[in-house]
Every structure is written in structure tokens, then in C-alpha cells.
Amino acid sequence: MKPPVCRSVAFQNLFFFTVFSQGYQAFASYTRDLVVAPGHEKVLGYCSICQSTDYIFMNADALDQKGWDAVVTKMIKVYGAPVPDSDREMLIQYLTVHYSKTSRTVQK
């Protein structure tokens, strides 16, 4: 059985090369703008490997910190998202502050 595309080392290398050499412009037409705040670039970088940022907006009204923790954990453990432990909490914090059911900054 072939691993999912997002687990492919070659795909990850291509993704990071494209993102960091193009300044995210390569994905501008596929993603909605996220709130620019600490953690923004990491959320965009890690989450856009396998999906658009629409996933964040679709779940913002339903998830709180516990929910985003579960989603980030699932993306790492089940889908193989290459998120180091040092960045995991930053992702959860950013998503909770800006895209949760208790957030006031959710952009729909």
C-alpha cells in the first residue's frame, strides 16, 4: 500500500522549497487568508501540506482548544503531518485564539 501523498519525503521537500522560495504565493489561489499573528506562518506551512486553509474555517465554529488539540494530534499521528513537538502547541494556540467557537477573530 502506498503512503498518502503528504507523507512522501519528496513531496514534503518540494512543498517546502516551493513555499519558502515563492513566499506562499504558489498557494494564494488555493487558500483563504489567515489572521496574521504569531504562529500564522507555521499554521500555513504545516496545514497547507495536505489541505487548503478552508478546513480551518469550516471547523472554526465547532472547535475549542480541546478540539483543535485533537485535530492537530490526528493530523500528526494518523496522517503523518511533519510537525515537531516544539511547534505543536503553537499551532493549537494560534487556532484556538483565532479560529475557535469562542474566538472573536474568525473570518468567514
Image: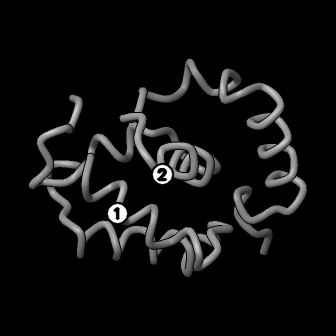
Q: Secondary structure at mark 2?
A: loop
Q: Quadrant of residue 26?
A: top right
Where is residue 38 drawn, in percent x and y?
Answer: 45, 48
Query: On the rendered structure, is 55 left or right of 82?
Result: left
Amino acid type at mark 1: Gln
- Of the numbered discs 1 and 2, the one sitting upstream in the chain is 2
Residue located 78% across and 44% down the image: 15
Q: Nearer the viewer, residue 51 or 64?
A: 64
As displayed, is residue 62 above or below residue 64? above
As displayed, is residue 18 above or below residue 16? above
Q: Nearer the viewer, residue 7 or 95?
A: 95
| Location of the N terminus (image quadrant) | bottom right
Query: On the rendered structure, is 17 left or right of 78?
Result: right
Label 1 sits on residue: 93
Furthest residue to the right? 10
Residue located 86% across and 62% down the image: 9
As displayed, is residue 68 above or below residue 56? below
Q: Residues within 10 Å of mark 2 (few under 14, many from 20)?
A: some
Query: On the rendered structure, is 68 left or right of 40?
Result: left
Label 2 sits on residue: 39
How many numbered discs sit on the rendered protein?
A: 2
Furthest residue to the front? 38
Residue located 67% across and 21% down the image: 25
Where is residue 103 drawn, in percent x and y?
Answer: 14, 49
Q: CA distance from mark 1 to mark 2?
A: 8 Å
Amino acid type at mark 2: Gly
Q: Secondary structure at mark 1?
A: helix
| Location of the C terminus (image quadrant) | top left
Mark 1 and 2 residues: CB-CB less than 8 Å, in contact? yes
Q: Residues within 10 Å of mark 1 (few under 14, many from 20)?
A: some
Q: Quadrant of residue 57?
A: top left
Where is residue 51 drawn, in percent x and y?
Answer: 54, 45
